[in-house]
Amino acid sequence: MRTLVKNIKELVGVETSPKQRKEGKEMSVLETVKDAYLVIEDGKVQAFGEMKDLKEGNADQVVDATGRMVFPSFCDSHTHLVYANSREHEFVDKIRGLSYEEIAKRGGGILNSAKATAAASEEELYDMAQRRLEEVVRLGTGAIEIKSGYGLSTDSELKLLRVIRRLKENSPLTIKSNFLGAHGIPMEYRGHQEDYVDLVINEMIPKVAAEGLADFIDVFCDKGFFTVEDTARILEAGIKYGMRPKIHANEMAVSGGVQVGVKYNAISVDHLEQMGDAEIECLKGSATMPTILPGCAFFLNLPLSPARKMIDAGLSVAMASDYNPGTAPSNNMQLVLSMACIRYRLTPEEAFNATTLNTAYAMGVSEEVGSIAVGKKANFYITKPISSYEYMPYAFGENKVERTFLNGKEV
């Protein structure tokens, strides 16, 4: 199947010499081609360039993009998309003054979702998740990482990961799975959480690995959750079974999560609302992608991660949605793009790189997706008629996506 997209007003996010990620000043570089064409063959980018250089040849499908722009699909490297219930009553509790920690201590938060997950069937969870995936595609996302973590028991965690496996098998999106059994501490383990850590290590991880259910292993290393010592034990066990680490770090406090993530070669450390100079210095020269979750900070009124300071220090920065029912109930990466500019003072160019190539790196797929480059998957969207690429983060209240293509096919 050969597809030609022609008369593109501007083709954004192209790479002639593909990088795995962009860092520091490189993040301000966003290559584009005006009055462009794009050729897709067998699901991958075969060629692109200026219309004046196009030799049309044979195409099975021709798409006229006059007045419209083309972007690489967003890559959302941090979501909890498989869950059973919304938690708007906790939203009201927060309005009335309860903190996230207070809600969690009384059995709400993650434990609330775990209870609903245990009661739901695998089929029910799959149907709900499939509908959510269809929505993220309409908003321009083409690659997504999905975590477990709303199970907190062996059976429920396996159920969640089996749902994610089915989504991988049946969805056109590029999907990575993440085992987050250490997302919260069940009530029955309060006061002796080391026993729950033992359960994760000795029972959950071997069973997850036996079914090949997870690409990554994750831990919520933060105040009131799992300690650095807990985290190290869990990561070491996951690594033995071939799962690369990721970390929830420094959402509530400077927890040591960044340092333990770098020590164990985590592909990313995520949240980072609480960051000091030591954490920034630790990330320098590492293979670990600092990943900021603007939707969570917005929803919980948390301090903003120092994105500008990190980039100015030469670091890469990625930004993902943290889509989940309790602390970031939004799957809209266009909104993340806008918040990157509005709240974190990234330029549009930096924000695009933070939500495409760098988030692709944070889920281990930047050689496949995250930019328009020959040989990469043809994951892109065509906008409605818009004036410039700066309009994308500027107009935060509307969906600018008109048509979406994944693996070269319109979906």
Image (spheres, rainbow, N blue to C red):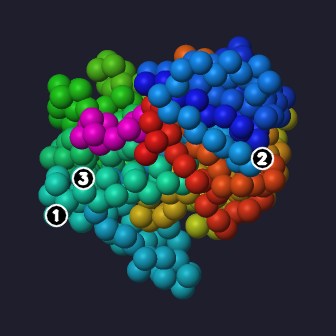
> Which residue type carries mark 1?
Ala
Q: Which residue is mark 3?
A: 126
Residue plotted at (31% across, 32% down): 214
Residue 124 seen from this side: yes
Secondary structure beneath label 1: helix
Question: Which residue is outermost to the front?
Answer: 57
Q: Residue at x 41, y 39 (%)?
A: 173
Q: Which residues are magenta?
A: 165-175
Residue 197 makes an appearance in the image: no
Structural distance between the alpha carbons of marks 1 and 2: 45 Å
Whether 291 is drawn above or below 85: the answer is above
* Left or right: 78, with 186 as reference point: right
Of the image marks 1 and 3, the number of the one nearer the N terminus: 1
**Residue nearer the viewer, 281 or 318:** 318
Residue corresponding to mark 2: 389
Classify mark 3: residues with Cα within 10 Å, few (<14), some (14-19) or many (20+): many
> Is 391 rendered above or below residue 373?
below
Separation (CA) of disc 2 from disc 3 = 35 Å
Residue 379 colored magenta?
no
Mark 1 or 2, which is nearer the eye? 2
What amino acid is labelled 3 in the image?
Tyr
Q: Earlier in the sequence, mark 2 or mark 3?
A: 3
Please identify, in this view, whether the residue under mark 2 or under mark 3 is nearer the observer: 2
Q: State yes or no: discs 2 and 3 in contact (Cβ < 8 Å).
A: no
Relative image position of residue 90 (x, y in whole percent): 43, 76
Q: What kind of element bears circle 2? A: loop
